[in-house]
Image (cartoon, rainbow, N blue to C red):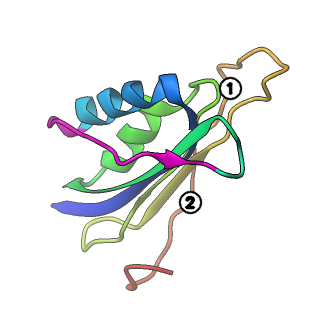
Amino acid sequence: MTTRGVLYVHSAPRALCPHVEWAVAGVLGTRVSLDWIRQPAAPGTWRSEFSWQAEVGTASKLASALRGWHLLRFEVTAEPCPTAEGERYSCTPTSASSTPSPASTATSSSRRTASARP
């Protein structure tokens, strides 16, 4: 069974952008090229959105591939389907003044809804 979802990269330093693409490509098993635009809320960073369709469980794989990356803020969502509930994972890095922590979290919450978008 497949589902679809969206990866929202809220902010990433420019040098990290190709690494995000490589990580997403590794999970999806296909070449990925994100459209990056400047993030006005955090000068010097970039943002992107990427819609995907893949097997159920892909949202957690994407979140796991990206979590813990210092200075990367993102969310991954997956829509509900007949065999799985919707998912949302988000990650906010530690502040630039502190040491990166392996405890950077990707959290999930399930939604029981039939709508594709809130």
Residue 10 picture location, percent across and down: 57, 49
- Marks 1 and 2 close (CB-CB < 8 Å): no
Sort mark 2 into few (<14), some (14-19) or many (20+) by Cα contacts within 10 Å: few
The residue under the point 38% across, 40% down is: 62
| Residue under the point 25% across and 67% down | 83
> Furthest-bottom residue in view?
115
Which image quarter: residue 49?
bottom left
Q: Residues within 10 Å of mark 1 (few under 14, many from 20)?
A: few
Quick one: label 1 or label 2, which is nearer the N terminus?
Answer: 1
25 horizontally vs 71: left or right: left
Q: Is residue 80 visible?
A: yes
Identity of the amino acid at label 1? Ala
Residue pictured at 24% horizontal, 74% vertical: 82
Q: Which residues are magenta?
A: 28-39
Tag count: 2
Q: Along the line of sight, which residue is nearer the eye, 88 or 112?
A: 88
For the view shown, which residue lies furthest in the top direction?
99
Q: Which mark is residue 68?
A: none
Residue at the image position 21 percent from the left and 40 percent from the top: 28
| Residue at which label 1 appears | 103
Q: Is residue 8 magenta?
A: no
Residue 26 in the image: above or below residue 78? above
Residue extending farthest right: 97
Q: Main secondary structure of the magenta part?
A: loop
Q: Secondary structure at mark 1?
A: loop
Q: Do we see residue 73 in this rendering?
A: no
* Disc 2: which residue: 109
- In space, the residues marked 1 and 2 are separated at their CA atoms by 18 Å
The image position of residue 25, as x and y in percent, is 24, 34
Q: Position of residue 7 (x, y in %)?
A: 41, 52
Q: Label 2 is placed on what type of residue?
A: Ser
